[in-house]
Amino acid sequence: MTKYFKNSRMIQLFSELGIEVTKENGDKVDEVIHDMLSVDYPNGAAAWKMVRKKLDSEDAEGVKQRLKAALDRLDL
């Protein structure tokens, strides 16, 4: 599983979104996040930097909603 998924902010984010990240779906969740943020996969450091930036922005709720919608399409 991706290292930045273990960060407390990511754990809280996944909890808020009702997403359980497992060994089985972790790579797919990571790919969705990279795609949503336009970050080359598997650059976890760049993805984490962008996630933090987006969560600290004025559109944090919009980012969460878009991520939730993208992950819901995976039927996790």
Image (spheres, rainbow, N blue to C red):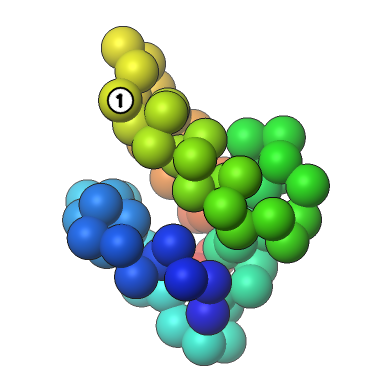
Is 27 displayed left or right of 7 in the figure?
Answer: right
- Residue visible at 41% across and 66% down in the picture: 5
Query: In the picture, residue 74 is in which quadrant?
Result: bottom right
Is 35 displayed left or right of 75 in the figure?
Answer: right
Q: Position of residue 29 (x, y in %)?
A: 57, 63
- Residue visible at 76% across and 56% down in the picture: 41
**Residue 69 appears in the picture as rendered:** no
Q: Is residue 35 above or below residue 23?
A: above
- Residue visible at 63% across and 35% down in the picture: 37
Residue that badge 1 annotates? 56
Badge 1: residue crowd in 10 Å (few <14, some 14–19, many ≥20): few
Q: Position of residue 47 (x, y in %)?
A: 58, 47
- Residue visible at 22% across and 60% down in the picture: 8
Q: Is residue 60 above or below residue 28?
A: above
Q: Residue furthest top?
A: 58
**Residue 68 appears in the picture as rendered:** yes
Q: Residue furthest right?
A: 40
How many marks can you see?
1
Query: In the picture, residue 28 is in which quadrant?
Result: bottom right
Which one is in front, 18 or 29? 29
Is 41 displayed left or right of 3 in the figure?
Answer: right
Q: Residue furthest bottom?
A: 23
Q: Position of residue 48 (x, y in %)?
A: 49, 48
- Residue type at mark 1 is Asp
